[in-house]
């Protein structure tokens, strides 16, 4: 007896991904019609494998569809998978499988019942939804919890295709009933479906009441980890009526902080943080009960957040981005844990950078010495970007902590003595910020900075040094000579350096006019006559006019007191921060942007297919599809946007050809910025009025008119 081929054994389906040979489509068609079950299953697997690697096997649609009439659950799953993928290109043929779906929805096997309902929900063909409602209604009340939880998710999918149908058939009310289900997984999927529908519709369909709240909290301890995430996210959107209720919910949620899954931990943190606001806002000043509870919660939140930093680098990064928001909201939670954010030698660069941001936010006068030692060590690393960020962090510590500024400057001077080019340049940049934060305090170090002028070759470092020379020209003996060295290469410099040179030279002239008159004349000539940078020319003309008409006014403008810069450690706006804290454990908390800033929700027609799963925030739109949808929805091809969208190429009525009709947005569109008439306006266009603005003798023989 011949030995059995090992490739036929289970678990070796990789053989189906081998390169197809010519004529195999015909062979597959024959195998799909085979009476042998194993041959038929293998044939469908080959079709699925080809589909997976991007080959077009839609020509076998009818042949695969014929295989759906089987009692074999493995074969049925494979056929359903094929149908979901190709239903959008073969909607009419998909209708042939409806009878099988309806029949399977009544099958004695709960797995087949659930599979039929799930597949019908995923096939986004409008006419199939008509047949889906009855099986879905039965599945939502099925005796088996697996079928019920699958049906709950299917309601969210159906809502995305036909929201009116879901409301008419009362499926949302049925989802509310599922929240009272005895099975925690059914409760979790009911909550997930309602949350998805809320996101899609933009209105609150969850409606958490006191009784619903208790059921959610009861299911929280028993459902799967992802079910817990759904329930916790729903609780985070609920606003407790009073501080006592918030405290009670927090007590039930706190055990989730010890969960092994980081998503559950972060969702629990989100709930607790949002409820702490309620406790803090409603606590009476006299009674310290809630204040004590808040302190206890603050102590409980630190360990789980610290534990997340022992995970893989990718999870660490996500945790750090979330912690960045948390310490801006409540710095006290991690104020004693700054050591855990010190960088390890084997941390990836993206983790190190994020740790530095959090160190700056947690630094205080108690730990500044420890932090400065750590940052000084980082400044000797080999990664240039990390070193620059570390030097910059020292400067930000100085700007944040006034009493520690002198110590920070001492460390920066030590780093300058290393003579490492990029360290010196970054130090000059941050020292400029320190001077702006604390004017007239630390000018004694300017001499050290001037000794390192030759090493500066980056635009930002040059601009910073030139600003320091101009600002403190009266304290630098050879300020004009130092500026003169930069002027030799004025035309080759970066625009930022040129602008700073112009201003610094004018400052130097106003402080020492006798010795710098020739230099300022040369700079003004270069800026106004040689340069093609409009910003530089405009500033040069303004300074020239000021100096020639009223030097005293020039002193008030150029040498006037400037506002000191502020500490930007907690730079997020309070309202935005509250929104982002409410989005902890989502992409918003990683991007530090609200969802609407990076997610486009697009309503797609059912025929376009695609599967919107529960938990999807939005749908990505291909560039070509987006243009077609935009034109279809806004009738762009008809030349008018009515009260809806705006033509993105509309130039406010300006056309290349003066006689060409202007395309303007009417109705609710944007107003015309250039004063061109609206097409809806029936008033005749007034004659243009022109006036002479410059005589020929003043403009090289050319009359200048404007109107």
Image (cartoon, rainbow, N blue to C red):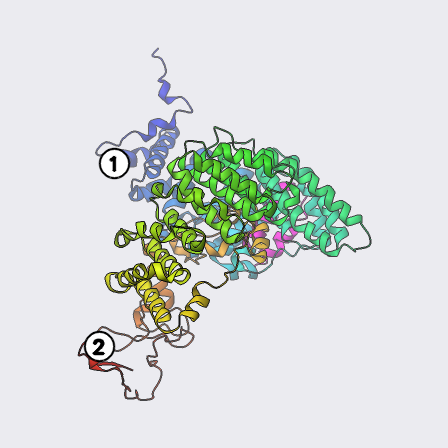
Q: Quadrant of the C terminus?
A: bottom left
Region in magenta: 169-197
Q: Which residue appears at 39% of the width and 47% of the height?
A: 461
Estimate the x, y position of residue 618 in percent, counting from the top left.
Answer: 47, 52
Estimate the x, y position of residue 486 in percent, counting from the top left.
Answer: 31, 50
> In the image, is 266 to the left or to the right of 379?
right
Q: Label 1: how many residues lie within 10 Å, few (<14), some (14-19) or many (20+)?
A: few
Q: Which residue is mark 1?
A: 26
Residue nearest the viewer, comparing 463 with 532: 463
Secondary structure type for disc 2: loop
> In the image, is 398 to the left or to the right of 389?
right
Can residue 193 be found in the magenta stretch? yes
Count of numbered labels shown in the rendering = 2
**Where residue 699 is drawn, which disc sits there?**
2
Q: Is residue 645 visible?
A: yes
Quarter of the view holding residue 39: top left
Instruction: Give the CA separation, mark 1 to mark 2.
Output: 83 Å
Residue nearest the viewer, comparing 138 with 388: 388
Principal SS element in the magenta part? helix
Estimate the x, y position of residue 569 in percent, counting from the top left.
Answer: 55, 49
Q: Is residue 68 visible?
A: no
Of badges 1 and 2, nearer the viewer stands 2
Of mark 1 and mark 2, the one earlier in the sequence is 1
Can residue 643 be found in the magenta stretch? no
Q: Residue furthest top?
A: 1
């Amino acid at each position: 007896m011949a030995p059995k081929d090992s490739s036929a054994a289970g678990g070796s389906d990789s053989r189906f991904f081998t390169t197809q040979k010519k004529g195999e489509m015909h062979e597959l068609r024959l195998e799909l019609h085979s009476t042998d079950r194993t041959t038929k299953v293998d044939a469908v697997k080959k079709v699925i494998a080809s589909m997976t690697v991007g080959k077009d096997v839609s020509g076998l649609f009818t042949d695969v569809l014929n295989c759906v009439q089987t009692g074999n659950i493995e074969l049925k799953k494979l056929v359903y998978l094929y149908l979901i993928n190709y239903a959008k290109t073969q909607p009419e043929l998909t209708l042939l499988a409806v009878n099988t779906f309806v029949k399977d929805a009544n099958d004695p096997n709960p797995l087949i019942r659930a599979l039929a309902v799930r597949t019908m929900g995923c096939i986004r063909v409008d006419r199939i939804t008509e047949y889906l409602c009855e099986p879905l209604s039965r599945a939502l009340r099925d005796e088996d919890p697996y079928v019920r939880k699958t049906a709950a998710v299917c309601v969210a999918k159906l809502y995305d295709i036909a929201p009116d149908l879901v409301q008419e058939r009362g499926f949302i009310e049925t989802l509310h009933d599922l929240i009272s289900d005895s099975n925690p997984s059914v409760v979790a999927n009911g909550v997930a479906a309602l949350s998805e529908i809320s996101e899609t519709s933009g209105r609150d369909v969850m409606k958490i009441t006191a009784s619903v709240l208790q059921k959610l909290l009861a299911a929280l301890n028993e459902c799967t980890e992802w079910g817990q995430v759904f329930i916790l996210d729903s609780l985070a959107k609920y606003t407790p009526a009073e501080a006592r209720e918030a405290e009670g919910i927090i007590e039930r949620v706190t055990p989730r902080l010890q969960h092994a899954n980081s998503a559950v931990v972060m969702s629990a943190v989100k709930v607790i943080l949002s409820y702490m606001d309620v406790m803090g806002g409603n606590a009476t000043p006299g009674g310290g009960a809630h204040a004590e509870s808040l302190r206890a919660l603050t102590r409980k939140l630190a360990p789980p957040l610290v534990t997340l930093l022992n995970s893989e680098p990718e999870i660490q990064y996500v945790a750090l981005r979330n912690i960045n928001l948390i310490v801006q909201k409540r710095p006290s939670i991690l104020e004693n844990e700054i050591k855990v954010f010190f960088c390890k030698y084997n941390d990836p660069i993206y983790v190190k950078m994020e740790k530095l941001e959090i160190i700056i936010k947690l630094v205080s006068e108690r730990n500044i010495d420890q932090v400065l030692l750590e940052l000084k060590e980082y400044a000797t690393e080999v990664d240039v970007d990390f070193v620059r960020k570390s030097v910059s962090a020292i400067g930000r510590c100085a700007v944040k902590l006034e009493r520690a500024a002198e110590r920070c400057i001492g460390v920066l001077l030590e780093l300058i003595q290393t003579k490492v080019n990029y360290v010196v340049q970054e130090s000059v940049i941050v020292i400029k910020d320190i001077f702006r934060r604390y004017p007239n305090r630390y000018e004694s170090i300017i001499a050290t900075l001037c000794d390192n002028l030759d090493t500066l070759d980056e635009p930002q470092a040059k601009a910073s040094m030139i600003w320091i020379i101009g600002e403190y020209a009266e304290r630098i003996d050879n300020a004009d000579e130092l500026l003169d060295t930069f002027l030799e290469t004025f035309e080759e410099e970066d625009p930022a350096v040129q602008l700073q040179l112009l201003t610094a030279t004018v400052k130097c002239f106003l402080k020492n006019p006798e010795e710098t008159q020739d230099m300022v004349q040369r700079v003004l000539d270069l800026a106004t006559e040689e340069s093609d940078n409009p910003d530089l020319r405009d500033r040069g003309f303004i300074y020239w006019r000021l100096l020639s008409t009223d030097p005293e006014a020039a002193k008030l403008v150029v040498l006037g007191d400037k506002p000191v810069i502020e500490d930007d450690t907690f730079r997020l706006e309070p309202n935005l921060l509250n929104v982002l804290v409410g989005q902890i454990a989502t992409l918003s908390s990683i991007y530090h942007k609200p969802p609407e800033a990076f997610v486009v929700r697009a309503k797609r027609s059912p025929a376009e297919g695609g599967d919107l799963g529960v938990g999807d925030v939005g749908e990505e739109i291909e560039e070509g599809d987006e243009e077609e949808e935009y034109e279809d929805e806004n009738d762009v091809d008809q030349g008018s946007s009515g009260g809806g969208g705006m033509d993105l190429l509309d130039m406010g009525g300006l056309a290349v050809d003066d006689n060409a009709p202007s395309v303007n947005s009417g109705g609710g569109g944007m107003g015309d910025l250039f004063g061109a008439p609206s097409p809806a306006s029936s008033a005749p266009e007034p004659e243009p009025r022109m006036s002479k603005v410059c005589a020929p003798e003043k403009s090289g023989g050319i009359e200048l008119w404007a109107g």
